[in-house]
Image: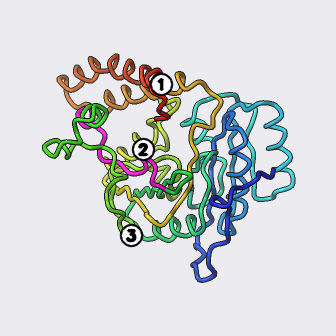
Amino acid sequence: MNGAAKPILAPEVAPADDVVPRRRVSVVMVAYMTGEALAQSLDCVLAEPLVDELVVVDNGSRPQEVERLRALAAREPRMVLKAGHGNVGFARGANLGARTATGDVLVFLNPDAFLQPGCIAALAREIEGRPSPCLIGGRVLNADRTEQRGARRGDITPMSALMSMSGLAKSPALHRYEVHWEGDALPSQAVPTPTISGACFCMRREDFDRVGGFDEGYFLHVEDVDLCWRVRQAGGEVLFHPKAEVVHIGGTSQTSPLKVEFHKGVGLARYFRKRAVGPVQQAAAWALSPLVLAAAVVRPLLWKLTGRAN
């Protein structure tokens, strides 16, 4: 499967002085009606010599897309395709991919994300020797190489989400509630970060298994936020790696934006209920659930009216 790569996204072989990781690396990708971006994403992964295995879980793409995936898997010995199970949701699909993978280091990658030179090496090197459990997210970029919103975030709580989404966190007095950190200075090395993007991150297999993998109660979105939270709850660390870069196009799925935002709202409401402690917080989380869902559904309508993409 070949895609016409744009120069900015063209895969390159990492420098020769990069240290090849001792552990086998498996890239796990869940695809669902991704479109043309999938071909380029697969090309970038298979051009990376440090990737020992690529597991693609197809959640129900169009027949012609599935046939192209089958043809690629037939001629590419590193690729394993899981298909025919229907749209089981991202979390369940990712867990299926992790169980299928044989690698010791699991890199989860979105099907519309393009690995940049040295990304896999940086992730695999950084995770060696880290306390367990550990999760390391890469630096997610837009096509113009600006850092993508949501690539590194603070702790997402009902209060921080409300302050950040409303714009109130932009004021100096409430800035501590700002969730999005992409505007902050870029660190020179991997640093602890409460929440990273699920577009590209890595975990050791034993750590992924220790925390139970993705919570399959989430269908689409917020499962990455939940995983980061559970890693931290287990006494582990979540890191943001500034040198493990991936370009994420986003918005390539042919699924309705309204449907996507609906699932995001459902997931966020579930996440707030899940982490609520005690009857007071539980009651507040349940009371907020319809508001969170309503806000999520209204967003794509506002984007359409204002012409904004996000």
Q: Main secondary structure of the magenta part?
A: loop
The foreground one among 245 and 80 is: 245
Image colouring:
rainbow
**What residue is rendered at 81% in x and 50% in y?**
1
Cα separation between marks 3 and 1: 36 Å
The residue at which mark 2 appears reads as 227
Q: Is residue 207 left or right of residue 252?
A: left
Going by the numbered disc 2, the residue's amino acid type is Leu
Q: Is residue 309 left or right of residue 57?
A: left
> In the image, which is nearer the foreground, mark 3 or mark 2?
3
Residue 154 location, x and y as percent?
30, 47
Cα separation between marks 3 and 2: 22 Å
> In the image, which is nearer the foreground, mark 3 or mark 1?
1
Residue found farthest to the left: 173
Residue 167 location, x and y as percent?
27, 35
The residue at which mark 1 appears reads as 300
Badge 2 density bin: few <14, some 14–19, many ≥20, Cα 10 Å: many
Residue 149 location, x and y as percent?
42, 46
Disc assigned to residue 189? 3
